[in-house]
Amino acid sequence: MKKYYLGISLIIFCIAGFYVYSTYNKPHKNLLNQKAEFVVKPDEWILEFDTDEVKALNKYLNKIVEVEATLLDVQTIENKTLWTLKTGSELVNIQCEMDPRFIKDAMKHAKKGERVRIQGLCSGKLMDIVLSQVVCLN
């Protein structure tokens, strides 16, 4: 009887392990081939978060958002390329963590002061609005 329970436990453990492994190693979406769920203007987007952050989070969180704005800064930190986009507010910007699969093409358009059109997954708002897996659409 103990061998039976041990066998069943081992099977359940293997299935759970496979699920965890496959979920952890699941590839990211290719946002370059996806249509944005929202196309926003930076000023209006900031105002929406400032007016009602909970409502804005419910609307945009983990959704594909397209935005066109002026590029303020480009940084590389720990193998991650971050773009900062200017908004109408001096206190809040849009932080974009670029998708490493498309960074070479994106860097061709990475000139400070130029307007760029990007889309990415909205990760929420801390001090700035944060987008991840960002691709450049220019």
Image (spheres, rainbow, N blue to C red):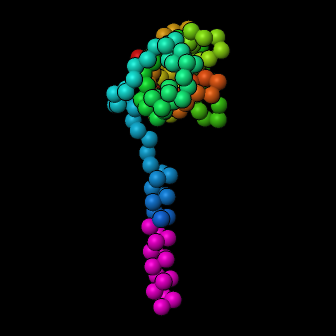
Q: Residue at x 44, y 74 (%)?
A: 11
Residue at image point 60% right, 11% down:
89
Q: Is residue 11 above or below residue 5?
A: above
Give 91 or 105, whichever is nearer the viewer. Answer: 91
Q: Is residue 70 visible?
A: yes
Residue drawn at point x = 46 percent, y = 13 percent = 41
**Horizontal and vertical percent for residue 16?**
47, 65
Q: Residue 125, image x and y in percent?
A: 58, 27
In the picture, measured across the screen, residue 33 lies left or right of residue 56, that is: left
Which residue does the image show at 51% across and 18% down from the upper left?
48
Relative to residue 60, is residue 117 depicted above or below?
above
Which SS type dominates the magenta stretch? helix
Is 49 in front, or is 4?
A: 49
- Quadrant of the rendering where the C terminus is positioned: top left
Q: Is residue 83 above or below residue 133?
A: above
Q: What is the number of callouts on the image?
A: 0
Where are the magenta residues, as a range?
1-15
- As for residue 95 lying within the magenta part, the answer is no
Q: Residue 58, image x and y in percent?
A: 48, 32
> Can residue 83 be seen at all in this image of the molecule?
no
Residue sticking out furthest to the bottom: 1
